[in-house]
Image (cartoon, rainbow, N blue to C red):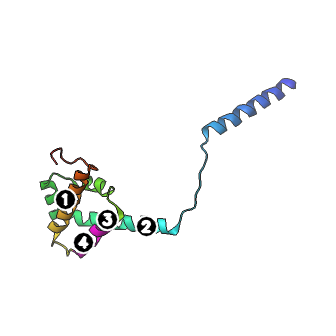
Amino acid sequence: MNTSRIFNSFLAICLLSVQLVLVPAANAAMVSTESVLHAEQRSAQEARIMGALQRAQAVTMLEKNGLSVEQVEVRLQRLSNTEVAQLADQADRIPAGEGVLGVILVVLLIFLILEILGITDISPKV
């Protein structure tokens, strides 16, 4: 009887220590409504930009300049909220099939600025 009690105590200590080591601690924080709204607005703006860049004319222009839609999507994540908002506004103002060149030139200009600042590495020449 004494050995079973020692064994049960040892087993309980082992299980408790394994649980404390393997189970990570959960951290919680207050999430403000403003931060959630900003995140949703940014994702909606990025979706509008990507929608404009999915057009056939935009894809061919990007390919001519050595960029793919995936590269644009990755670099879009690096833009600030104001830059994303400006691009989204321009994407909304472009009628279907018109002015895609303007959006692509703006995107390429932003990439050039990011390249000069050293944030991206599109070309080693710039």
Q: Amino acid at mark 2?
A: His
Which region of the structure is painted magenta?
82-93
Q: Residue at x 27, y 63 (%)?
A: 50
Disc nearer the start of the sequence (4/1): 4
- Which secondary structure, mark 4? helix
Disc nearer the start of the sequence (1/2): 2
- The residue wearing badge 1 is 108
Residue situated in front as seen by the camera: 46 or 10: 46
Which dot marks residue 38?
A: 2
- Which secondary structure, mark 1? helix
Cα–Cα span, label 3 and label 2:
12 Å
Which secondary structure type mostly characterizes the magenta part of the structure? helix
Cα–Cα span, label 3 and label 1:
14 Å
- Indicate yes or no whether the magenta region holds residue 89: yes
**In the displayed structure, does residue 30 sit left or right of residue 53?**
right
**In the displayed structure, does residue 61 sit left or right of residue 31?**
left
Give the class, few, some or many, for how many residues have Cα within 10 Å of label 1's Cα (few <14, many ≥20): some
Give the class, few, some or many, for how many residues have Cα within 10 Å of label 2's Cα (few <14, many ≥20): few
- The residue wearing badge 4 is 90
Disc nearer the start of the sequence (3/1): 3
Which dot marks residue 89?
A: none
Cα–Cα span, label 1 and label 2:
25 Å
State if disc 4 and disc 2 touch (CB < 8 Å). no
Q: Amino acid at mark 3?
A: Val
**In the displayed structure, does residue 14 sit left or right of residue 114?**
right
Q: Amino acid at mark 4?
A: Gln
Where is residue 82? Give x, y as percent.
33, 66
Disc nearer the start of the sequence (3/2): 2
